[in-house]
Image (cartoon, rainbow, N blue to C red):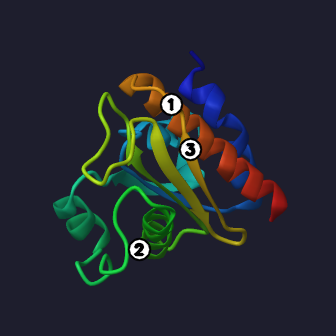
Amino acid sequence: MESLTALGSVVGKLLSERGETIGAAESSAGGLINATLVAVPGASAYYLGGGIVYTVAGRSALLGISAQDMSHTRSSTETFAKLLAERVRANLGATWGLGETGASGPSGNRYGDAPGHACIAVCGPVEAVITLETGSADREANMWVYARKAIELLESCLRKA
């Protein structure tokens, strides 16, 4: 298994060199995305904050996402991942926002998404949203895949900016 520091080092270097900042709001990755960003020595130069937004109470209290904000979407969608990324970016005043939502497993979520389903969004000077389907019910393995794919998506956006 790849180390958190190794996984986050390239995006950390790119963000630091540019003087850009990031915030991350994640759900089914359980903190691994934020841990990857923070594990790099010198992370305080670019990492402004983030959190695990796992419940309705969490998204309301931590990001100010209301029932009205959710009226035309649900969790575990690209639209919601983008909302997470946009909101964490705006709330922290960051250059970039990263959002993740999904179903880690071993079962699917209440919306009918299978375990291994996740949506990841990057908002900033370049934006991107992806949906993953791992086909696996292994909770921890899925969490690592989500974190890795989120960092890869962020790196791709950073390189395009």
Which residue position holds label 3?
132
Q: Is residue 142 above or below residue 47?
A: above
Tell me residue 110's x, y (percent): 24, 50
- The kind of residue tagged 1 is Gly
- The kind of residue tagged 2 is Asn
Residue 16 in sight here: no
Which residue position holds label 1?
135
Q: Residue at x 64, y 70 (%)?
A: 124
State the residue lying farthest toward the top.
1
Q: Is residue 44 left or right of residue 50?
A: right
- The kind of residue tagged 3 is Leu
Q: First in sequence: mark 2 or mark 1? A: 2
Label at residue 91: 2
State the residue lying farthest toward the bottom.
68
Number of the front mark, 2 or 3: 3
Q: Is residue 56 above or below residue 113?
A: below
Is label 2 in contact with label 1 (beta carbons under 8 Å)?
no
